[in-house]
Every structure is written in C-alpha cells, then in structure tokens.
Amino acid sequence: MPAGDEFPPVRQGRRPGAQRAPHRRVPRLGPGPHRHPRGPRRALGGDPHFPSGQETDMALILVTGAASGLGRNTAKALADDGHDVVVHVRNRARLTGTDDTDRFKGVVTGDLAELDAIRDVAGQAAEFGRFDAVIHNAGVMNRPEDATVNTVAPYVLTALMEKPARLVYLSSSMHRTGSTDLGRLTDGTAAYDDSKLWVTALALAVASRWEGTSSHAVDPGWVPTRMGGRGAPDDLTAGHETQAWLATHHDVTPRTGGYWYHRRTQTPHPAAQDETFQARLLRALENHTGIPLG
C-alpha cells in the first residue's frame, strides 16, 4: 500500500469490452405536458427577493444517478415544482420505458466508475451553463467501484464544474462505520461505508472552503430502492424530499455544512468534521485524480 496520501493515479482507461463514445452535443428535451409555467430564472443562495422558506421561480439543477430510485424521484419532484432539471444516467438505455423524460431540460450520460467518463459528464453539463444546484445522488454498493462512484465522481464533478450556489451529496448512516484509512481509496479494498464517510467529509470540506456556496450531506435512510431492497423500512418519499429541499429552499439552517436526515440535522462521524482529515482527503483525491479542488 502506498504510504501516506501519495497514491498512484486513477485508471484513465475503460473496462474490458467498454467503448467510449466521442464527446457529443447534449440532447435537450423540449417542454412536454408536465412542464410548469415559470417566471424568470433567479439564482439560489440567500437571494433577498425570496422570503424565508420560499423557493426560486426557477432553478437549473443537475441530479446524478437519476435513472431510478431516489435520483429519479428527486428529479421528478423538482421538475414538477417548476425547476429546470438536467438528469444524469449511465447510458440512455437506462431511460428506456420511462414516461416522464419530457419533463426534464436535458440528459447527460456517462459511467461514473471511469475517470474519463466523469470528465466527459462535467463537459456535457457545462453546455447547460452554470447550475444553481447540483445533487450528487449517484451511488453503488458492494462493488469494486464503490469508492470511485460514491466519492471520486462527486469530487471530480465538483472540481471541474462551475461553482453552483448549492451542493448536495448523498451520504448514508453507514458512514459512521467507515474507515479513515485513505489507502483504501486506490488499493481496491474500500467498502461502501468507507466511501460514504469520505463523501460526507468532502461535503463538509467544501462547505468550509467555498464561500458563497452551500454544501450539505444527506442520509436518505434505508429506503426501498433497487439498492435498499423491497424490505427496507424507511420512507422513500422523505428520502428524496430532503435532497430537493436543500437544493431549493431558503429556510435551511445551518446554511451550509449540515449532515441531514429527513430535514433534521444529525451529528456525523467525527472524522467528517475534522479539518485535518478533510485536508488529507482532499490531498488524496487530488493525487488520485490529478485534479485539484480549486
């Protein structure tokens, strides 16, 4: 295992059998019957024109991992509330059979397990302009790519995209059993709970470093999605509503740096709030990807 935070760079190539498509113009989906009339777009983040608790007339929001489950429900709820929503999916086939894509402003595609594809997703997203909010919802569990999808991808997208007013990162109560051994980031031993501790620390690190951008981590609960299973006991609606709320509302206290469960703050793992660990994590992620946070 490499010593300290000096990690070899993340693999740039593709998994065997995968083919990378050239960069392409991003498909934009025209207004459909589900679209709501909106007023002029106004930026999020403490806008004095909006009293406490009120949403903007319209916001441009990116939701990653929006093919199903929490991500799809979050994207649909935001679109139904009148926001311009761009959804990310691994590939367009993931949208096959859905009947609600016409409510979204557009789609970006890419496998967040590959650094080249993550970069490409950032490039596709940039074609829509500056987002008011980005919800880093995409995640996997018990796979070799847990750390890449759950931690590295949110980091790279955060670093490469123009700073939004609001950032939301999907955490989990399981982050409390995660390891602070950052050597696991690249040696193939990172577990799901490790990746969720790291992304929680990332959210709080961004909160303390980026003035003017609010950044929060969210535990959606153990909900009945494809990942959580049909028997999961938590409320799926409450799981996605907190993400949408943090991305749009102005009655959020604290304004930044919160760890949330169903619109209530909780105390995360001590390491997630530790400035020394946050600095180690950011250094490790920069060494791992070759991309500074900025």
Image (spheres, rainbow, N blue to C red):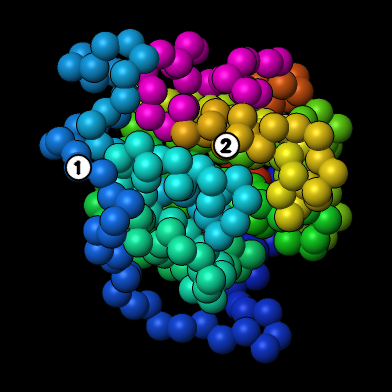
Image depth: mark 1 or mark 2 in front: 1
Task: Examine the structure image and report whether residue 172 is included in the region drawn in magenta.
Answer: no
Quadrant (top left, top right, bottom left, bottom right) of the N terminus: bottom right
Note whether residue 85 is visible: yes
Rendered view: 47 above or below 105: above
Quadrant (top left, top right, bottom left, bottom right) of the C terminus: top left
Residue 7 place in picture, x, y as percent: 70, 55
Q: Quadrant of residue 27?
A: bottom left
Callout 1–callout 2 Cβ contact below 8 Å: no
Task: Examine the structure image and report whether residue 258 is included in the region drawn in magenta.
Answer: yes
Residue 153 place in picture, x, y as percent: 57, 54
Name the residue rendered at 40%, 13% in the picture: 251
Q: Quadrant of residue 18?
A: bottom right
Name the residue rendered at 45%, 41% in the picture: 77
Q: Is residue 114 left or right of residue 38?
A: right
Badge 1 is on which residue? 37
Rendered view: 95 above or below 65: below
Name the residue rendered at 60%, 35% in the picture: 237
Residue furthest out toward the front: 33
Label the magenta part by its dominant secondary structure: loop
* Mark sitting earlier along the chain (1/2): 1
Residue 141 place in picture, x, y as percent: 78, 53
Specify few, some or many for label 1: CA neighbours under 10 Å numbering under 14, 14-19, or 20 or more: few
Give amino acid for label 1: Pro
Give amino acid for label 2: His
Q: Is residue 220 left or right of residue 214?
A: right
Which mark identifies residue 240?
A: 2
Q: Which residues are magenta?
A: 245-267
Specify few, some or many for label 2: CA neighbours under 10 Å numbering under 14, 14-19, or 20 or more: many
Name the residue rendered at 81%, 34% in the picture: 233
